[in-house]
Amino acid sequence: MTILTWNDQYCIGNALIDEEHQALFRLINEFHSQWSQNHDLGTILPILNQLIRYSQQHFQDEERIMEKEEYPLLEAHRKCHEKLIEDIFRLHEEFSTHNVRLEHDVQKFLKHWLVDHVIHNDYAFRDYLVGRPNRPT
């Protein structure tokens, strides 16, 4: 079952970032699908763990690219990433206690954090890349 559908409006313009965003969409959809089908913590928790690890790697990759591109809002973006990771770790800890209400909270968080982050934070980087004259390669 799909809760997020990728489309080109989410593209940032950097191939690696766009590929990783698509992979995050897939992982969130896999988590949601497994949760919807069986609510089995033994099946769902490894997917959530994979999503957390992948998110951490993605944020590192994204920050490295932003640094290379001399993005002036990198530090603010980095703080946003730190907050997202803190939030997902907190939800993970609570989720692992198998609280049904928290399962719903995790679903909501996963559905919105990626899209909201892309729209509110990564789009600023996209706009910076598009508007930057003489970008280094």
Image: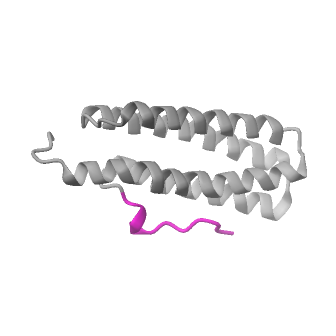
In screen coordinates, is 132 left or right of 66? Answer: left
Q: Quadrant of residue 74?
A: top left
**Place of residue 117 in the rendered image (x, y in percent of width and height, measured from the top left):** 51, 50
**Place of residue 82 in the rendered image (x, y in percent of width and height, measured from the top left):** 55, 32
Closest to the observer, 121 or 33:
121
Point out the image quarter for the C terminus: top left
Q: Residue at x 62, y 44 (%)?
A: 51
Closest to the observer, 85 or 32:
85
Q: Residue at x 78, y 49 (%)?
A: 43
Q: How is the image coloured?
A: one colour
Point out the image quarter for the N terminus: bottom right
User: What count of labels does the image hold?
Assistant: 0
**Place of residue 25 in the rendered image (x, y in percent of width and height, measured from the top left):** 55, 57
Q: Residue at x 54, y 55 (%)?
A: 116
**Place of residue 6 in the rendered image (x, y in percent of width and height, measured from the top left):** 49, 66
User: Does the magenta segment cover residue 79?
Assistant: no
Closest to the observer, 91 or 28:
91
* Dominant secondary structure, magenta: loop
Q: Which residues are magenta?
A: 1-11
Decide: is 114 above or below 6: above
User: Does the magenta segment cover residue 3?
Assistant: yes
In screen coordinates, is 51 left or right of 43? Answer: left
